[in-house]
């Protein structure tokens, strides 16, 4: 792929490292950012679903943006989650993230309220129009209760700041059609489906698994980009047990932290309620043991 999208291709949906008493751990944030950069990530999403967005304050998301941007020193794009089911809150969050130095905004559709398509378009338009920072829409109906239709995405694609979509619907056929019809940069947001989405033309990934194995998610993108689907399948075969182990028991925010703590990248797997701390699933422990054994 000759032209890189404006917000990168290899994006990690970063967890928010915390101390056992629930405070954000800046030293662990810095260690995790170093780990993601060493693994080749060119984008880091803070304050998204995996970052426990509903439990973070606007000030905390701003502080995360500043900390990650300072640590990356321009080596990766910093994208801030700003979605909520209150439009005025999302607008304020977008402005705060832009002020903090975010390179992009991740805007999930409003949850719980289940608005009409007109309401979804007006909400997203209002938030996307409040700054000049590029916006990635986030379509995840299993969490929000509503999905963006092709017609709505086509309307939103006309907005100058809307550049792409994180697609977490899990419907590959619809995803291919929407990418073709809207022209938006299409990112896979379901780790178990990374390979088929990339092979079908997704520009990149916004990945939970990249927290744990960024070098492998990067190799997957590179192999598909080179047209070497055989090599891509080999990488995918390595990644798939990890993806299933992290995402199928879930929630990914807790299991990814458990895996990172087990691997020594962060010092604690602590999360904030309503999530509770999890042990690394057995499949993930086996994967980590195999990857770190002398014969691996």
Image: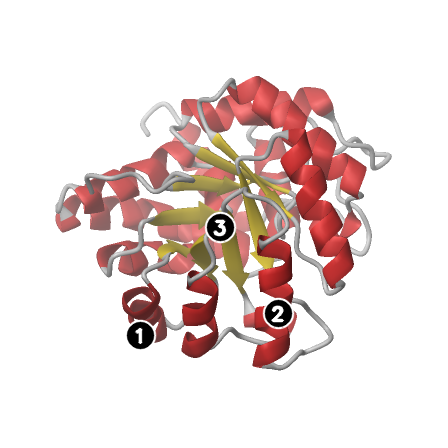
Along the polypeptide, which appears first: circle 2 or circle 3?
A: 2
Which residue corresponds to mark 3? Answer: 161
Along the polypeptide, which appears first: circle 3 or circle 1?
A: 3
Q: Secondary structure at mark 2?
A: helix
Choose between 276 and 101: the one closer to the eye: 101
Q: Residue at x 15, y 41 (%)?
A: 226
Mark 2 surroundings: few (<14), some (14-19) or many (≥20) residues within 10 A: some
In percent of width and height, residue 279 lies at: 66, 45
Give the CA separation, mark 2 to mark 3.
14 Å
Which residue corresponds to mark 2? Answer: 122
Q: Quadrant of residue 27?
A: top right
Q: Quadrant of residue 179?
A: bottom left
The answer to whether residue 235 is visible is yes
Choose between 180 and 296: the one closer to the eye: 180
Along the polypeptide, which appears first: circle 2 or circle 1?
A: 2
In the picture, the quarter occupied by the C terminus is top left
Which residue corresponds to mark 1? Answer: 173
Q: Residue at x 30, y 72 (%)?
A: 177
Q: Secondary structure at mark 3?
A: loop
């Amino acid at each position: 792929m000759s032209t890189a999208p404006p917000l990168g291709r290899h994006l990690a949906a970063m967890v928010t490292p915390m101390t056992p008493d629930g405070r954000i751990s800046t030293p662990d944030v810095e260690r995790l950012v170093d780990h993601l950069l060493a693994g080749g990530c060119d984008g880091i999403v803070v304050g998204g679903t995996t970052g426990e967005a509903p439990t973070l304050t606007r000030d905390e998301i701003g502080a995360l943006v500043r900390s990650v941007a300072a640590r990356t020193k321009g080596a990766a794009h910093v994208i801030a989650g700003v979605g909520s089911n209150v439009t005025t809150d999302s607008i304020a969050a977008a402005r705060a993230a832009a002020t903090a130095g975010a390179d992009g905004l991740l805007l999930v559709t409003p949850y719980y309220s289940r608005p009409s398509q007109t309401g979804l378009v007006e909400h997203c338009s209002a938030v996307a129009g409040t700054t000049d920072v590029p916006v990635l829409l986030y379509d995840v109906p299993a969490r929000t209760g509503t999905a963006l239709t092709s017609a709505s995405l086509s309307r939103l694609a006309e907005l100058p700041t809307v550049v792409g979509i994180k697609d977490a619907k899990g419907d590959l056929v619809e995803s291919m059609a929407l990418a073709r019809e809207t022209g938006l940069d299409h990112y896979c947001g379901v780790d178990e489906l990374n390979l088929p989405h990339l092979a079908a033309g997704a520009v990149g990934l916004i990945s939970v698994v990249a927290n744990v194995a960024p070098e492998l998610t990067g190799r997957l993108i590179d192999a598909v980009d080179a047209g070497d689907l055989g090599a891509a399948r080999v990488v995918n075969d390595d990644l798939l047990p990890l993806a299933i182990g992290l995402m199928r028991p879930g929630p990914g925010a807790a299991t990814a932290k458990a895996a990172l703590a087990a691997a020594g990248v962060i010092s604690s797997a602590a999360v904030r309620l309503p999530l509770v701390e999890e042990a690394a699933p057995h499949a993930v422990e086996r994967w980590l043991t195999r990857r770190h054994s002398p014969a691996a």
